């Protein structure tokens, strides 16, 4: 026969179980709007029965709560994070492509076409009366306005590149912060779970950090029970590519390292690279998420990077590169001093110069800071990386290419004649030496002519002393330094409008040749100068629209997946209200059991004196 008071124990377990259910339901309800929270449920089973030496066999002992578990689906977690990585990638692209588009926006009054057309209108007026000082001064002013607009576009690109560069540093700091928090929470979780139970709320917080991290960079997460016995201790690993970010209680920190040298001529100083503590470079262009988009937007060159093959002898401090990808002067965007990768070895070069072989292909000679460590035979050579994306670097290079081609065509015609005082024509458009601040003379010195040098940085081993003029190739013409030659701007009489002045000052044959450049279909692959700019703006518009479309589509996908995930882990207020009533009834009925048993014991003990 069972113990007379056993019913009290059974009723008590029911009240305890219902009370835990009510508390868990209350916890769910109060966290309905908590980001990352997963609905918790009470898992119960019948408590261990007692054997009774009677014909009815076993006697139930009530209910026991085995666990309070969170409702999550790992499939949806993985699906959400992989798509959230893409969302972060497209979101960053959309934001910065929209910013670039804003700078190139043709709707603005002082856009490319407005400035370019005003300059050409001023040339038309000058051609009508070449001797007019007013017309000459006006032509100079509109030319300088056009140059300054190109300068401002380049400055805007530099500022945007600096902004992206700073965000790369911010993202690295954010990754480091998340890694430290994840490792810390893993330690707390294991400390609590080793004694039994599940640290649901801490796990939710850790999963939320993982979700946020997945937006920044592509990650792989693995959790394994430590040892053969399930004692509540797990190892928790977060990987970025092949590198470990978090290893249970330990984490690696990304270091932000400013580049000492440039890859591209127009890049700002101190662009950031990321490195692991071991010194291994973080492959920002291949690790997905917002970080990859930032690197692509900042450095994207549409695969227009320098590469070729070279042979060299160990101990040499120069190397010659042939079969290069760049065989047009206007497309040379190498920094004057930078990093060149030969095979798998990086070298710092302090200057380079360019000649041509018998087939007209460019031959580059780089002067290195250090000797070659081994012999190279047709080794692969590159400066920078091939990035298929059209980022800030690409558009800066396009601006440089425009100024070089346009300025050279214009200057070649301008130097065919004489100015108002019968002096030989000067370069009309120019750039400035970064050291001396002087305008270049876009000609070759006698030594360069003799050596067949097309381009020389005149730095490092190729430095030239005491030249009678500031000789330079159009490699030095950039959108940043684009301007009217100072001598011409200060003295409008230096503007060339005629081949000679024998027929009088009103001669204007050169002026009309210059005006004809406006409609020169052969100047650019895209046609006229205006065609080049319009094509560039149209290209940017397509890229920006594509980025916006991809961003919105990916956001919709992530939202749908998140809804699917919430259907499993989200808190439903109506369902929790039903649970609350259900647990309340259970609690009341269990209390009724105890009350009933109390009456029975009262009758048995007090009334029957048993």
Image: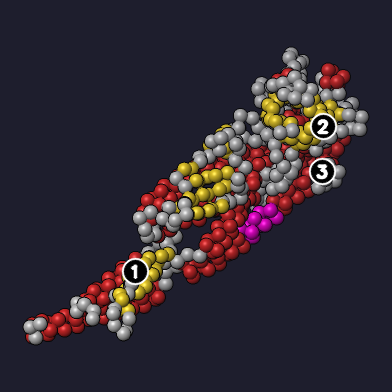
Name the chief secondary structure element in magenta: helix
Which marked residue is nearer to the observer: mark 1 or mark 2? 1
Give 160 or 154, whichever is nearer the viewer. 160
Q: Residues within 10 Å of mark 1 (few under 14, many from 20)?
A: some
Mark 3 highlights which residue? 524
Q: Secondary structure at mark 2?
A: strand
Place of residue 89 in the rendered image (x, y in percent of width and height, measured from the top left): 60, 52
Which marked residue is nearer to the observer: mark 2 or mark 3? 2
**First of labels 1, 2 by sequence position:** 1
Residue range in magenta is: 541-552
User: Looking at the image, which residue sits at the far top?
Assistant: 466
Mark 2 highlights which residue? 378
Q: Secondary structure at mark 3?
A: loop
Question: Which of the numbered marks, if any, corresponds to residue 452?
Answer: none
Mark 1 highlights which residue? 65
Q: Is residue 111 visible?
A: no
Q: Residue at x 40, y 75 (%)?
A: 575
Disc 1 to disc 2, C-alpha distance:
73 Å
Q: How many marks?
A: 3
Q: Residues within 10 Å of mark 3 (few under 14, many from 20)?
A: some
Disc 2 to disc 3, C-alpha distance:
33 Å
Disc 3 to disc 1, C-alpha distance:
78 Å
Which marked residue is nearer to the observer: mark 3 or mark 1? 1
Q: Secondary structure at mark 1?
A: strand
Q: Residue at x 30, y 71 (%)?
A: 17
Give 209 or 502, whichever is nearer the viewer. 209
Place of residue 275 in the rendered image (x, y in percent of width and height, measured from the top left): 57, 37
């Amino acid at each position: 026969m069972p113990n007379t008071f056993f019913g009290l124990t059974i009723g008590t377990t029911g009240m305890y179980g219902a009370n835990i259910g009510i508390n868990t339901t209350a916890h769910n309800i109060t966290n309905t709007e908590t980001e990352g929270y997963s609905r918790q449920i009470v898992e119960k089973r019948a408590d261990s029965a007692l054997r009774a030496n009677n014909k009815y066999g076993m006697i139930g002992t009530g209910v026991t709560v085995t666990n309070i578990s969170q409702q999550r689906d790992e499939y949806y977690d993985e699906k959400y994070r992989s798509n959230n990585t893409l969302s972060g990638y497209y979101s960053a692209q959309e934001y910065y492509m929209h910013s670039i588009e804003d700078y190139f926006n043709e709707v603005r009054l002082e856009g490319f076409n407005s400035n370019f057309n005003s300059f050409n209108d001023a040339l038309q007026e000058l051609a009508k009366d070449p001797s007019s000082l007013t017309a000459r001064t006006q032509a100079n002013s509109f030319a300088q306005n056009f140059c300054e607009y190109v300068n401002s576009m380049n400055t805007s690109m530099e500022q945007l590149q600096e902004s992206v560069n700073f965000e790369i540093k911010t993202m690295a700091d954010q990754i480091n912060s998340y890694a430290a928090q994840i490792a810390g929470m893993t330690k707390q979780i294991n400390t609590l779970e080793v004694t039994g139970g599940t640290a649901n709320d801490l796990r939710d917080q850790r999963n939320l950090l993982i979700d946020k991290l997945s937006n920044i960079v592509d990650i792989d997460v693995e959790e394994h029970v430590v040892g053969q016995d399930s004692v509540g201790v797990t190892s928790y690993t977060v990987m970025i590519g092949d590198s470990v970010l978090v290893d249970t209680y330990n984490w690696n920190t990304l270091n932000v390292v400013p580049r000492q040298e440039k890859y591209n001529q127009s890049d700002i100083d101190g662009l950031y690279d990321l490195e692991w503590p071991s010194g291994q470079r973080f492959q920002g262009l291949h690790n997905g998420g917002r970080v990859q988009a930032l690197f692509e937007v900042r450095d994207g060159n549409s695969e227009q990077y320098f590469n070729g093959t070279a042979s060299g002898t160990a101990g040499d401090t120069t190397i010659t590169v042939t079969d290069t990808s760049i065989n047009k002067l206007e497309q040379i965007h190498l920094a004057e001093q930078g990093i060149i990768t030969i095979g798998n070895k990086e070298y710092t070069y302090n200057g380079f110069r360019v000649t041509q072989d018998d087939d007209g292909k460019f031959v580059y000679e780089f002067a290195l800071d250090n000797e070659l460590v081994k012999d190279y035979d047709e080794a692969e050579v590159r400066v920078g990386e091939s990035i298929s994306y059209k980022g800030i670097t690409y558009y800066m290079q396009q601006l440089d290419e425009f100024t070089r081609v346009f300025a050279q065509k214009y200057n070649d015609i301008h130097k065919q004649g004489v100015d108002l005082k019968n002096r030989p024509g000067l370069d009309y458009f120019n750039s400035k030496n970064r050291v001396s601040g002087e305008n270049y003379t876009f000609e070759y010195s006698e030594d360069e002519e003799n050596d067949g040098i097309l381009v020389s940085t005149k730095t490092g081993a190729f430095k030239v002393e005491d030249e009678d003029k500031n000789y330079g190739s159009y490699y030095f013409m950039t959108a940043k330094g684009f301007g009217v030659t100072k001598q011409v701007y200060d003295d409008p009489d230096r503007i060339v409008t005629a081949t000679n002045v024998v027929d009088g000052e009103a001669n204007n044959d050169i002026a009309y040749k210059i005006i004809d450049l406006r409609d020169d279909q052969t100047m650019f692959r895209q046609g006229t100068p205006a065609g080049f700019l319009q094509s560039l703006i149209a290209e940017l518009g397509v890229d920006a629209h594509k980025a916006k479309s991809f961003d919105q589509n990916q956001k919709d996908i992530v939202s749908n997946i998140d809804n699917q995930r919430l259907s499993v882990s989200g808190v439903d207020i109506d369902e929790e209200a039903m649970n609350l009533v259900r647990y309340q009834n259970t609690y009341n009925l269990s209390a009724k059991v105890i009350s009933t048993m109390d009456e029975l014991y009262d009758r048995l003990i007090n009334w029957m004196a048993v």
